[in-house]
Amino acid sequence: MAGPDDKNQKVVHGYGDGGVDTVLSVDEVHEAADAISQRPSRETLRGLADGEPVLRIEGLVAGYGRMEILHDIDLYVGKGQSLCLIGPNGAGKSTILHSIYGFTQIMDGEIRFEDRVVTRVNPNKKLKECGIAYILQDNSVFPDMTVEENLWMGGFLLNKSDATRAAAERVFEKYDRLAARRNQPARVLSGGERRLLEISRALVMDPAILLVDEPSIGLEPRFINMVFEILHDLQHNEGKTIIMVEQNAKKGLEYADIGYVLVSGEVAMAGKGDDLLADPEVGRLFLGG
């Protein structure tokens, strides 16, 4: 390991916070991860869920158009649990979220929310009838609208405007940061506050399940901690089930009850978040150590 003053040895960072001496290309990560793949059984994955799964995926084959991205995916998560999907770029992590919400072409398999098959239910019905909300990876606030107006947009499926306003008020009661800026345009918010607004907008519909795509992307470390504290509160104090994709694998696994490692559209490894954090091969490939 090179010392800090060794100018001839370049130290870079991996997926997490640790330093590594060798840069692995995406293809090399795929190959190395594939080599250690355990291909966990459906029974193993089911055993990681706490109680009866609130959301289950079995045999999912999905993609975009004719391009198949996911191959025979199984996933189980219990009510009030958190599950983090990690893996190299292009592994299909976000495609799982897109498939749950209804943004992909599903060729085979089943997605079930509680006792209801929702495989091909459209996104609006999944949000309104099942309480499945999707929080986009990209900056999705409306910059010229006020913070309050952005929250109202989260209630577009509610039949009555007074219900939307009441839900927005509950958000303001919960988050002082947003309440202080309720009448200001969203463009004045910091990166962390914008992410909070995106999460809060999804809460207007009081969802049971939050699909969160890259909650830490583009944020400074202090805001990353704030966002994960918010998610922790929603899970442990409000009973939300959270399924997330997180490129900062270390942070995601530290937070989540369950971790899945995806490689080439398949579940290569799965376990409790703490167990994957302690796995040396997961550390080498995804945690920067």
Image (cartoon, helix red, strand yellow):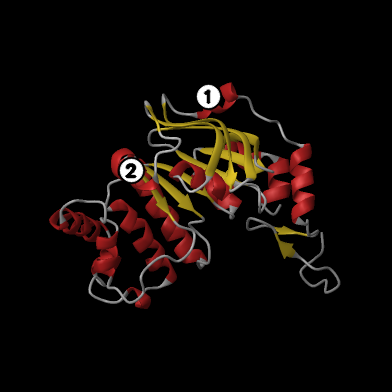
Q: CA distance from mark 1 to mark 2?
A: 29 Å
Q: Which mark is residue 158?
A: none
Residue that label 2 marks? 125
Q: Is residue 205 left or right of residue 259?
A: left
Q: Considering the image in quadrants, where does the N terminus appear?
A: bottom right
Q: Is residue 99 left or right of residue 23?
A: left
Report the residue at 83% width, 71% height from top: 6
Task: State the image coordinates of residue 159 (x, y, percent, origin top left).
Answer: 18, 51
Task: State the image coordinates of residue 261 (x, y, percent, origin top left).
Answer: 63, 41
| Residue 26, quarter of picture | bottom right
Give 192 or 141, whichever is nearer the viewer.
141
Task: State the image coordinates of residue 3 (x, y, percent, origin top left).
Answer: 80, 66
Task: State the image coordinates of residue 218 (x, y, percent, origin top left).
Answer: 53, 67
* Residue farthest to the top, as pictured: 43
Residue that label 1 marks? 47
Circle 2 SS class: helix
| Residue 273, quarter of picture | top right
Question: What residue type is disc 1 on?
Answer: Gly
| Residue 10, quarter of picture | bottom right
Q: Residues within 10 Å of mark 2 (few under 14, many from 20)?
A: some
* Residue farthest to the front, as pictured: 66
Question: What residue type is disc 2 on?
Answer: Lys
